[in-house]
Image (tube, rainbow, N blue to C red):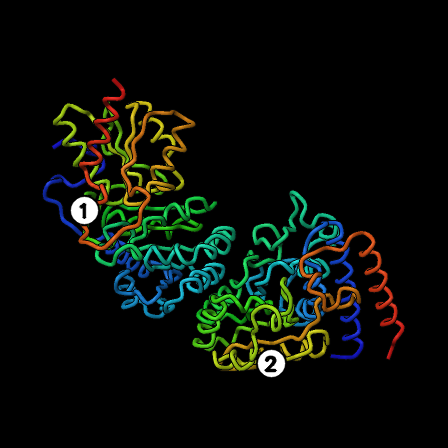
Amino acid sequence: MIKLNEELRLVDDFENVERIPTRDGYGKGLVELGAERNDVFVLTGDLADSTRTAWFKEKFPERFIDMGVAEQNMINVAVGLALSGKVPFVATYGVFVPGRAWDQIRISVCYNKANVKFAGAHTGISVGPDGATHQALEDVASVRALPNLTILSPTDFWESKKATIAAAKMKGPVYIRFGREKVPVITTEETPFEIGKAVVYREGKDVTLIATGQMVYQAIIAANNLMERGIDAGIINVHTIKPLDRETIVEAARRTGAVVTAEEHQVYGGLGGAIAELLSKENPVPMRFVAVNDRFGESGVADELLEAFGLTHKEIEAAAEELVKLKK
Amino acid sequence: MTTEEVKKLEILAYEIRKDVIVALKNAKSGHTGGSLGLADIFTALYFKVLHHKPEDPDWAGRDRFLLSNGHVCPVWYAALARAGYFDVEEFRTTLRKLGTRFQGHPSRLDTPGVESSSGSLGQGLSIGVGMAYAARFDNAPYRVYVGMSDAEFQEGSVWEALMAGGNWKLDNLTAYIDRNKIQIDGSTEGDVMPLEPLKEKLRAFKWNVIEADGHDIKEIVTAFREAGAHRGGPTMIIFNTVIGKGVSFMEGKAEWHGKPPNEEEAEKALKELDEHIEEMKEGGD
């Protein structure tokens, strides 16, 4: 297996990883926050169990609010709490928040700079059998254009927990994106996490793989396979999609001269788009985008869907090989 | 309230109308009708009802006022200015102009006294519900007030907020409806999407409902006081108002929802408002 940056204290064995849903990290993070500080409130829209906010509810029922199936009201009640000095965390499925409450997020959260932290659970194609209506594939695109917003897309359990806690510590609106399925745990409790700081797992010479969410694991597998075929690929985990860590990304593009992005999101307006916007100005290099190609999802089992929609290490490898050929 | 005090506020409401006319004439765009129609309510709020400190807009104990239908902010800015939050001349000359503190729709980060930015209808009540929830959680002594238009009750999110506010029995929350029955495309009842029977609907959502004349200072203050004294649930005051109130050629006209007076119209309006102020002053008791 390829070597990754040891300072990051990632797991040792990438072939036998533990699998935990990122939403569990959110739930644990909220419980920890609830014990630490009494200004943290948690709101959900009839989805306490599946957003793991039920764990907070159990411990701190007086600071838990079930808003019912009313997401627009939920966001603005959170705004009212935030403008009264509380730190509200809102959780439902990504298709509903930001989906249904976008106007509330635009004006009352972002224009107001209200200290609201909203989470979209069940994002990505891996939501599975529920199908297209419940697979949030446009959530990042829909909020990335909003000023004053920080967007987090953690890769695994630990990173989700740290992202949740870090979101409470920073002032201002934050969107955190989670998935439903169990995904590989590649970081450890000791792995450093800082909002806005992209994490370079490996520098690489020929191409840089820039991934977010559970696609970071696929990028690691891809880099390992590419190395066996003589391609030295760098890996960067971009857990903060906004604001982008410009310096780290530009540096990597300069060093390797080619970039593949990977995300469980539409190809338009997500991580790939953000990186293309940055690099086209700062350091243009050939790019490829591993993402959902402008289509809605469908029912199926998570792993089947990831294969069917081209969201695996295989597509990352193919894209990297294509770019390396192009460079020659 | 003494008759002297009422009269003073009635005159002030007409001064505020004049500020609105001048500011909108200078801005060359903006919402005249609703702003004029709310002058009496805003005067009552800022000079009789709300606990606030203009010299300390962030005073922790202040009552919170949210304007959900942000487009009528000229009357809000005028009332805030007259209360001492900022210079009235700055508002009258820079409203809606590049670099101003007085945006076309309220902006929390720009204007002292503005608790929350607004402009997209149907959002203020939810924020008020959240604020009232927080205030009750903290046992805070202040009240939360939300100003709303009637047409924004066509937004579904308003009913979500009503449901939550009623369910949580937030008796530290008072909202009012500017019931002028006029919206951009005509009458709310005859032309667009009727709200009636409004009182019954609100009561069904567990709100205490008070109806009052939105142009009678004494009635306005009494309504807010009754709302404040009510226990066991939030109160919605339906203020019957006339769009464009105080300027005869604007009164009751939907066309004045979203346009400013030109020079000539402003002059005519100011003359009429001045005459009215003189009459009130001479009127005595």
**Which residue corresponds to mark 1?**
A185
Callouts 1 and 2 close, C-beta under 8 Å = no
The residue at the far left in this view is A16
How far across and down, in percent of the image, does residue B170 sit? Answer: 48, 75
> Height in image: A207 above or below A188?
above
How far across and down, in percent of the image, does residue A149 sit? Answer: 43, 47
For the residue pair A97 and A154, the one nearer the viewer reads as A97
How far across and down, in percent of the image, does residue B67 sit? Answer: 59, 63
Q: Amino acid at mark 1?
A: Val
For the residue pair B98 and B172, the one nearer the viewer reads as B98
* Residue at the image point whose x is 58% and y is 78% from the top: B228
Query: Which quadrant would residue A193 be assigned to in this image?
Result: top left
Image quarter hosting the C terminus of chain A: top left
**Which residue corresponds to mark 2?**
B210
Pointer 2 local density, CA inside 10 Å: few below 14, some 14–19, many at least 20: some
Mark 1 vs mark 2, CA separation in Å:
58 Å
Residue A193: give its label. Answer: none
Element carrying mark 2: strand
Q: Are marks 1 and 2 on the same chain?
A: no
> Closer to us: mark 1 or mark 2?
2
How far across and down, in percent of the image, does residue B247 sit? Answer: 79, 65
| Left or right: A2 in relation to A200 | left
Total residue callouts: 2
Query: Which quadrant would residue A289 be assigned to in this image?
Result: top left
| Left or right: B99 in relation to A326 | right
* Residue at the image point whose x is 41% and y is 44% from the top: A144
Query: Which quadrant would residue B83 be assigned to in this image?
Result: bottom right
Residue B44 visible at all: yes
